[in-house]
Amino acid sequence: MEAQPPHPAAPPKPPRSNAPTWVAFALPPLACALWLAWAALTLGHAESEGGRAYDMVLYGVGGAGLTAVLAIAVLIWAGLRGFIGHALLALLTGLLLSPPLLWFGAGAVLSARRTDFEQRQAQVTALAQSIRDGDAARIRAAIDALPDAPGPAQALCMLQGRRTYKLVHWVWFDEYANGPNLPSEQLLTAAAAVVDGPATAEVKQATLRTALRALGERNQPERFGAWAALWRRTLPQPPPRPLLLSAEPDAAGDCAYGEPVDFVLRHWRDAGVRAWLDAGFGFAAGRDQTVSALRALRRADSLRALLAADAQFAALLREDEYVGQQALSAQAGSLSETLDASEHPQDAAELVEALRAAGARPRTTGPASDCELFDNAETRRDAARDSPQRQAAVQRIRAVLCPAAAKPRASKRDAAAKTKR
C-alpha cells in the first residue's frame, strides 16, 4: 500500500490589524482639532459676535460627549481584536495630548481675533487722523478702506464715539470698542469730504443727517448754518425756493436719525426755529411742520421772525383753530417751569400774548383747558419762590389763557392768609 502524501500545512493566520489602537490614540486630538477649526472660523475674526463664545462652550461639551461614545465603540472594537490593553494605553496618551493642543490652539484663535481687531482699530485711527489733517481725498480713501465697508454715514456715526462698528465683541469678555469721539468741527469736515466726492446724493444726505444728530445731541445750533450749507451742495443747482428740508426717518442701530425738522426742533426748540430760518430753510405747507415749529417757540421775537419768514403761519393762526390751540397748549403745560427757570419771566408772557395777538385761541374745552393746565401747575409749585417779575408774568399769562376769569386766581399764600383770618 502506497504511503499517502502528507497534508500540506495550513497557512498561518494573518496578524490581526492594530487599527483600533491607532484610532483610539488619534480620536481625542482629532476631536480637539475639529473643535478648534470651528472656533477659528467662527470666532477668529473681530466682527464675530461675542455670543458665539457660549456656542463654542456648548459645542465643546457636545463634542466631548460624542467623543466619549466613539471611544467606547473603539475600545469594544479593540477588545474583539485582542488589543484592548494597547487601545486603552493609546486612548490615555491621546487624552494627555489634548489639553496642550486645546491650550495652544485656543491661544492661536484668540491671537488671530486680537490681531484682526487691532488692525481694524488702526484703520479707524487712521481715518480719524485723516479727518484731523483735513485732506478730503485722504478722508474718502480712509472711509473706503474701512473693513466691512460700513459707508460714510456709519463711519461718521462711529466717530461720535458710538458702538456701531463690528470691532466690538471678544471671546470671553465684552470689549466695547467705541470709535473716537471727534469734535463737531471735524465731523463737519468729514461730511464735507463726502459731499464733495463721487457718492450719490442719497449717501451724502445720510452722512449729513448722521452729523446733524451729533450737533443736536451736543446742543450746538450755532453750527447748523455750516451744516445747511453742506446740505445745499447735495441738491440740484440752483436749489429750489423755498428750500424745504424733509426726509423720512431712518433706523440703523445706534446711528438712527429722525426727520430733520423734527430733530432740530426737538433738540433746540426756540434756538432750532431761529437756526432753521437763519439757514434759509422753510417749512412744508400743512399742519405737521408748522405745528412743530409753533410748539418749539419760547420767545416772542422768534414768533415774529417766523411770521415774517412764512405767511402760512399767520394764516394758520388766524384760520385754523387746531393750530392755534396746539401753539398755546404747548406753552400752557410747561409755563410754570419756564417761569421758575427763566431770569426774564416776561419773555414767556410776551410769547403767549404774541400768539394770541396773531390769532391763536386758547383751548377752553376738553379734558383740561389751557387755563386749567396752567393753574394746576401753579398750584403744585412752591409759592415762596415768587418774585414780583414772576407774579406780573403770571397775571399777563392768565389774562390770555383764562379770558373768562373775572379776576386772577388767589395764590396758595393768599388762600392760607384768608383761612387764618
Image (cartoon, rainbow, N blue to C red):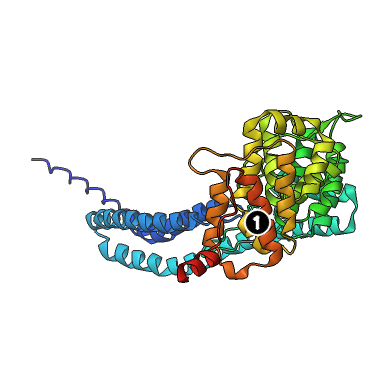
Q: Quadrant of residue 178?
A: bottom right
Q: Quadrant of residue 236?
A: top right
How far from the left and from the top, in percent, is residue 182?
77, 59
How far from the left and from the top, in percent, is residue 82?
24, 59
Nearer the observer, 347 or 268: 347
Residue 350 in sight in this render:
yes
Q: Quadrant of residue 45?
A: bottom right
**Residue plotted at (52% across, 61% down):** 380
Given the current orientation, which residue lies at the most extreme left position? 1
**Residue plotted at (65% across, 34% down):** 323
**Residue plotted at (62% across, 46% down):** 401
How far from the left and from the top, in percent, is residue 335?
63, 54
Residue 280 horizontal side relative to residue 354, left or right:
right
Residue 100 horizontal side relative to residue 272, left or right:
left
Number of marks in picture: 1
Nearer the observer, 217 or 348: 348
Quarter of the image where the N terminus is located: top left
Secondary structure under the numbered disc 1 in the rendered image: helix
Callout 1 crowding tier (Cα within 10 Å): few <14, some 14–19, many ≥20: many
How far from the left and from the top, in percent, is residue 192?
86, 46
Residue 360 horizontal side relative to residue 72, left or right:
right
Given the current orientation, which residue lies at the most extreme front position? 421
Nearer the observer, 109 or 287: 287
Nearer the observer, 416 or 305: 416
Residue 198 in sight in this render:
no
Q: Mark 1 sits on what residue?
A: 394
In the picture shown, does residue 111 fall above or below 239?
below
Q: Amino acid at mark 1?
A: Val
In the picture shown, does residue 146 fall above or below 413?
above
